[in-house]
Image (cartoon, grey):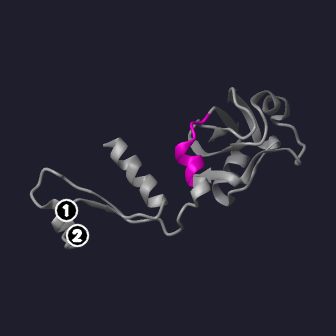
Amino acid sequence: MASKLEAARRATLAGAHVVIADARKDDVLARIFAGEDEGTLFVAAARRLPAKKHWIAFTLRPRGDVWLDAGAAAAVRGKGTSVLAVGVTGVRGDFRAGESVRLLAPDGAEIGRGLARCSSPEAVVVAGKKDDDVVLVHRDDLVVW
């Protein structure tokens, strides 16, 4: 069931309505298309996820993790801001610039995915530094859950 829910979530973010229903029932599709109350309806997201962000979120396999402090996690979640070096508390994995990374809150929850602007060794060196010019993931290449 978890895989069905994940597929429904992805489809709604792409702009599609989804119904999960029992296919063993006779004429279930006809009843759904007739507007009858059958299964569970997932309504398309109000704002469709652009193709690039859908690709980042669901097609690319993350090559590493970027751990954020509480302030950076709140800024990314609430405002969709870029991930700056100052808000990074840890880096895990082996990734290059342009590859997908998971963004993790202090409690380990995944809050989004994005394209890294630097490699993992470079990210380790700048993590936590107070230089605001260092962007690890730009908001244009970021998808927040």
In the rendered image, residue 3, in percent from the top left (x then y), is placed at: 36, 42
- Label 2 crowd (10 A; few <14 / some 14-19 / many >=20): few
Q: Residue at x 79, y 27 (%)?
A: 121
Q: Amino acid at mark 1?
A: Leu
Residue 111 sits inside the magenta stretch: no
For the residue pair 135 and 48, the one nearer the viewer reads as: 48
Residue 57 sits inside the magenta stretch: yes
Compared across the picture, whether 47 is left or right of 140 comes to: left
Majority secondary structure in the magenta region = helix
Examine the image and state in which quarter residue 68 appears. top right
Q: Disc 2 and disc 1: Cα gap in Å?
A: 6 Å
Q: Residue at x 55, y 53 (%)?
A: 54
- Label 1 crowd (10 A; few <14 / some 14-19 / many >=20): some
**Pointers 2 and 1 in contact (C-beta within 8 Å):** yes
Q: Residue at x 75, y 37 (%)?
A: 97
Part of the protein shown in magenta: 54-62
Q: Amino acid at mark 2?
A: Phe
Compared across the picture, whether 142 is left or right of 122 comes to: left
Q: Is residue 91 above or below residue 116?
A: above
Residue that badge 1 annotates: 29
Quarter holding the N terminus? top left
In the rendered image, residue 43, in percent from the top left (x then y), is placed at: 38, 65
Q: Secondary structure at mark 2?
A: helix
Which of the numbered marks, if any, corresponds to residue 33? 2
In the rendered image, residue 30, in percent from the top left (x then y), is placed at: 16, 66
Q: Is residue 53 visible?
A: yes
Q: Residue at x 79, y 33 (%)?
A: 123
Q: Secondary structure at mark 1?
A: helix
Q: Is residue 89 above or below residue 58?
A: above
The image shows a total of numbered marks equal to 2
